[in-house]
Amino acid sequence: MKREQRLRRNNDFRALYRDGVKVRLQGLVVYGRPFASEMHRMGVVASRKIGSAVVRNRFKRRMRTFFEELKTLLVPCDVVWVATQPQAARWSFAELQIHVKEGLEKLRKLLGEDIRKRARSEAVSKQAG
């Protein structure tokens, strides 16, 4: 993953939590915000309750390998994966891939609805103005 494809600044994460859509999965939470940038960007959050530094970094590396799938399934957007349960860090690579695909599908549906809502509200505001 290239440096410009990573979410790194605290302000980026806060904006995504505030304005994005949220999908809860077993052991993971996914936040997404469409058209926040011109390219796909991804961030991964793993707190100390997930495990030691070795475990957290392994989880982050595995999540970054799924970045290419993110590009094919979603419109350009910012996405943050948050590990909420220690079990997420213990999943095998295949199990994690299944959960990531499930999360991306749910996020894609919600982002599509969010985009349509924004387009409708912009159209209404243009007609009113």
Image (cartoon, helix red, strand yellow):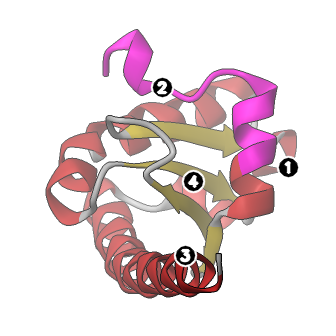
Task: Tell me which numbered mark, 4 or 3, is placed earlier along the sequence.
Answer: 4
Depth check: give the residue in front, 37 or 28: 37
Looking at the image, residue 25 sits to the left or right of residue 100; the answer is right
Q: Amino acid at mark 1?
A: Lys
Residue at image point 80% right, 59% down:
18
Q: CA distance from mark 2 to mark 4?
A: 12 Å
Q: Position of residue 82 (x, y in %)?
A: 66, 55
Q: Residues within 10 Å of mark 1 (few under 14, many from 20)?
A: few
Q: Position of residue 89 (x, y in %)?
A: 57, 53
Depth check: give the residue in front, 72 or 19: 19
Which residues are the magenta region? 1-15
Task: Tell me which numbered mark, 1 or 4, is placed earlier along the sequence.
Answer: 1
Q: Amino acid at mark 2?
A: Arg
Quick check: can you spot residue 27? no
Residue at image point 27% right, 53% down:
70
Q: Nearer the viewer, mark 2 or mark 4?
A: 2
Residue at image point 73% right, 40% down:
13
Q: Is residue 109 magenta?
A: no
Disc 4: which residue: 81
Disc 2: which residue: 6
Disc 1: which residue: 49
Disc number for residue 126: 3
Q: Are marks 1 and 3 in contact (CB under 8 Å)?
A: no
Q: Secondary structure at mark 1?
A: helix
Q: Position of residue 2 (x, y in %)?
A: 32, 15
Q: Looking at the picture, does residue 81 appear above or below residue 23?
A: above
Q: Secondary structure at mark 2?
A: loop
Q: Nearer the viewer, mark 1 or mark 3?
A: 3
Q: Are marks 1 and 4 in contact (CB under 8 Å)?
A: no
Q: Amino acid at mark 4?
A: Trp
Looking at the image, residue 37 sits to the left or right of residue 85; the answer is left
In the picture, residue 84 is in which quadrant? bottom right
